[in-house]
Image (cartoon, grey):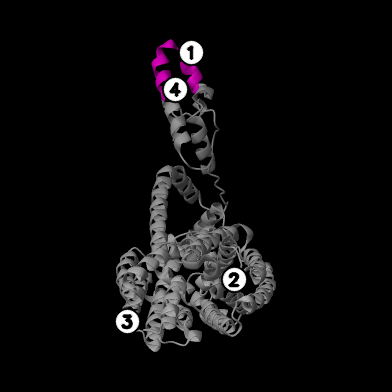
Amino acid sequence: MTCPFFQKQEELCDVGLGYISPYDVKTISSYCSTHHADCMRYRQLDRDPANRWQLQRINAQEESTRRSIARRPVSPISIKFRNKWPISHRLNLTIRESLQYPTTIKEEIMEETSNRSGWIVALAGTGINLALGILYTWSIFKGAITDSIAAGGPFNWDLASVNDPYAVACLVFAAAMIIAGKLQDKFGPRVTCILGGLLVSAGFIWISQTTNYWSWIVGFGVLAGMGIGFGYSAATPPALKWFPPAKTGLIAGIVVSGFGLASVYIAPLAKWLLGSFGLQQSMMFFGIGFAAVVCSLAMLIKNPPQAATSGKSAAKVVSDNEKSPMQILKTGKFYTLWLCYFIGAGAGLMVIGSAKGLAKASMGEMAFMVVVIMSIGNAAGRLVAGVLSDKLGRANTLALMLLFQASMMFAAYFGLNGDAQPEIVALLVTFMVFNYGTNLALFPSFTKDYWGMKHFGMNYGILFSAWGVGAFVMVRVAEMIKVQTGNFNNNFAVATVLLLVGAVMAFTLRPHEARAKAAAPATDLIEEEDLVLQESKS
């Protein structure tokens, strides 16, 4: 903007004589464009009625300028010049800043497009997890296998081994996360996700053709477990890369909530399919569905352009925080997180894997509804933990959730028995699964905060091994204790002690809580201009 009364004769302007700095030019221009009545030249025109038409035009222009400024979604500019800068360089900067409105519009359009793309990736990742979350409905398939064993066939397994395909799937899932993390870091998330969908589909189609124990170990445990690991690994990292650190917990919670929420529709669907077509035919339908849904949504998964990932200041913070897999294995923090993950995930999976068995004594044929209800708690735990961790800090949230889980396990020791009310059973199981779900939102956020995004896939895959080992150990031990004692009480007692130990370890992470530091825009601008000067002098 320019003053309409500024002329070459300096005495006609109220705003100074001789040399004025570029900063003064900016200030004068902005002020005079909206304060015509305060100008000496305006008052001179006002004395002559013949100039009234010109004054009306100026007033109309001033009103239009004020409205334009009011519509501009920009904050006041404060330019801090340095004496070492040449006058031409300072003036250049002033002109560039004075024309910031079009630049702001362009940046807003780019930011809006980036946000839209980021949410598309996040929602596609959530949809993929909604399909892969069939792992959490294993208790329904397990019930069908158990009933078949009791009826004398076609499944002829040892009762103590009924949970083995699920336990192996959890272990392979965790191991595949490491391989998949490397793949998605190198080849991108889309290829990794499509490969995961095809593997899960192949696993389910395989087990639809057989009742053999080892075939189910390979089909459900190895193929499906590996496919779930590939798909799950490729869903969260690209979504996190599209958003700033302040939204890490929220986005991680949204994406992984799909995995926990899957049972809301899969449980009743599986119940209907099992009743209408039998277990093996149902596995065929699920296998075909996986290939279609996961591979289709995978086409929407992509990493952001390098420029959109972060600004210059954010890049400086991230570059100092990037850690390779070998580097994180040398830190005590990694092992503390690993043990906390092992305890929190293992305790929750112990309940999830036997959810229908826990509820059957008190709820009869409606026991499958517990699977549906607890899936809502599972998803809610991921969302709540993600939001809380952005506000309270990751370590504080983790410690709080582990303590809450311990209290739920202690209550279950007395409350989950054959005489328990169905409402009590559903409430306790839901709260325990709610706490389990928090782990799946917190630990990806820990990984990004502590070790950056460059090696995120591989780093989180290594940390996620705690989930697989916890699932394999706790699920297997829980089933063995149940077969020997006939109830779950001793499992809850052991889990309570472990969770209390985990909460104590989580508190040790508090002094090292990672905090994102955003540099001020003015500082970035000055550093950029200094760099230009250095290059011009060299």
The three-letter amino acid code for the residue at tag 2 is Gly
Instruction: Report whether 522 appears left or right of 301.
Output: right
Q: Residue at x 42, y 28 (%)?
A: 64
Mark sitting earlier along the chain (4/2): 4
In this picture, which residue range is highlighted in magenta?
41-60
- For marks 3 and 1, give the one nearer the viewer: 3
In the rendered structure, are the residues bearing label 4 and label 1 in contact, judged by CB atoms less than 8 Å apart? no
The three-letter amino acid code for the residue at tag 3 is Trp
Mark sitting earlier along the chain (2/1): 1
Label 2 element class: loop
Q: Nearer the viewer, residue 48 or 270?
A: 270
Residue 538 seen anywhere in this rendered image of the structure? no
- For marks 4 and 2, give the one nearer the viewer: 2
Residue carrying label 2? 418
Give the Cα separation between the discs numbered 4 and 1: 16 Å
Q: Is 23 rendered above or below residue 201?
A: above
Mark sitting earlier along the chain (3/4): 4
The crowd level at tag 2 (other Cα within 10 Å; few <14, some 14-19, many 20+) is some
* Magenta span main SS: helix
In the rendered structure, are the residues bearing label 4 and label 2 in contact, judged by CB atoms less than 8 Å apart? no
Residue carrying label 3? 206
